[in-house]
Amino acid sequence: MIANLPLFPETASTMARRVDALFFFLLGVSGFFALLIAVLVVVFAIRFRRGRSPEPAKIPGSWLLEAVWTLVPFGLAMVMFVWSARIYVDMFEPPEDALEVFVVGKQWMWKVQHLEGRREINELHVPVGRPVKLTMTSEDVIHSFYVPAFRLKNDVLPGRYTTLWFEATRTGTYHLFCAEYCGTEHSRMVGRVVVLEPDEFERWLEGEGATETVVARGEQLFRELGCASCHAEVSGARGPSLRGLFGSRVELADGRVVVADEAYVRESILDPQAKIVRGYEPVMPTFSGLVDEEGLLALVAYVRSLATAPGSSSAEGAPKLAE
Ligand code: CUA
């Protein structure tokens, strides 16, 4: 198979073969028409040259011919559209049970945080045969997380969360690149993805460097930053209760209703005035500059954990989203 030529990166994810198949289809269609047109240009130039046919024939229109050369490209374009749209949608819809990993890009390294606590730099350890979802952000400029062997790439943006997911199909070590020019050392912003057997991965997670879980770290930050003094679990508290908040719909003072997702929690920490919950005063100060991106991810993970924590009573006016 052509995909096994050394010209091509390895195929090591469930998506890789699908992306390659689409790529070869596009290449095949483009190649076929490029060749067809080139050959016809030469053949017609010779066959209908002036010396040979000084009196060109008058050619009447043909609706059949026109219909064919309209419908065939239309059909081909629709095949390309539907095929690639399906791959795109699947690529950006992580499965529910995906293992979650946080990635923070900064000039010029990749910082990786596993929910169980282990952190790494310029390396990403994952288990084989299990979907992995990356939630990514940047501390400075735009980077792009790119693993050719997984046919996987997405921009990593400051001030925003982007996601990617993949399921590795083979153990091994694969290249990780930054695919967006991000400054002097951009070309050295490389790393590796290490795909391990599931039991090896479990051992690795518990290995040296393992610290508290991300949720525990978020809880500690929550206390250190004094969040609990307003977001208390009592009626009449200055801030809304966070229990059962994540994933729910939140009614805002201006009448809007938003879903409390990662981006909402992040924004509410950094820019509390952006979305004031109905029934509360805009008294929360910003925590911008007081907590870094990794801390924010930990806080988001902690708030999310409160949604499913025991004793969870859905906050008032916050029905759970049907999923
Ligand atoms: Cu980061 Cu290029």
Image: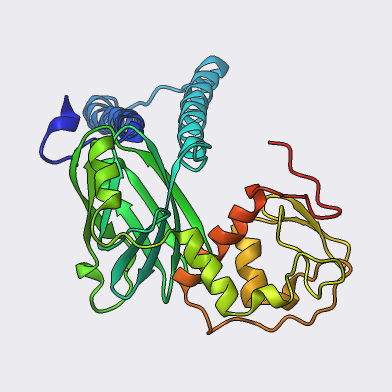
- Residue 239, picture quadrant: bottom right
Find residue 270 and report its horizontal and vertical position in percent: 62, 76
Which residue: 31% across, 53% down?
146
**In the displayed structure image, the side of residue 238 where residue 304 appears, left or right:** left
Instruction: Examine the rendered structure and indicate whether residue 169 appears above or below residue 112.
Output: above
Q: Quadrant of the N terminus?
A: top left
Occupied quadrant, residue 25? top left
Q: Position of residue 49 (x, y in %)?
A: 25, 31
Q: In the shown orientation, is residue 219 left or right of residue 251?
A: left
Residue 12 can be seen, yes or no: no
Along the viewing direction, whichever of 53 and 186 lies nearer the viewer? 186
Residue 44 visible, this orientation: yes
Picture quarter with the C terminus: top right
Left or right: where 81 falls relative to 9: right
Given residues 84 and 310, the one toward you in this image is 310
**Figure quadrant of residue 228:** bottom right
Q: Position of residue 6 (x, y in %)?
A: 10, 39
| Residue closer to the observer: 253 or 162 | 253
Image position of 81 (left or right of 17): right
| Count of marks, rendered view | 0
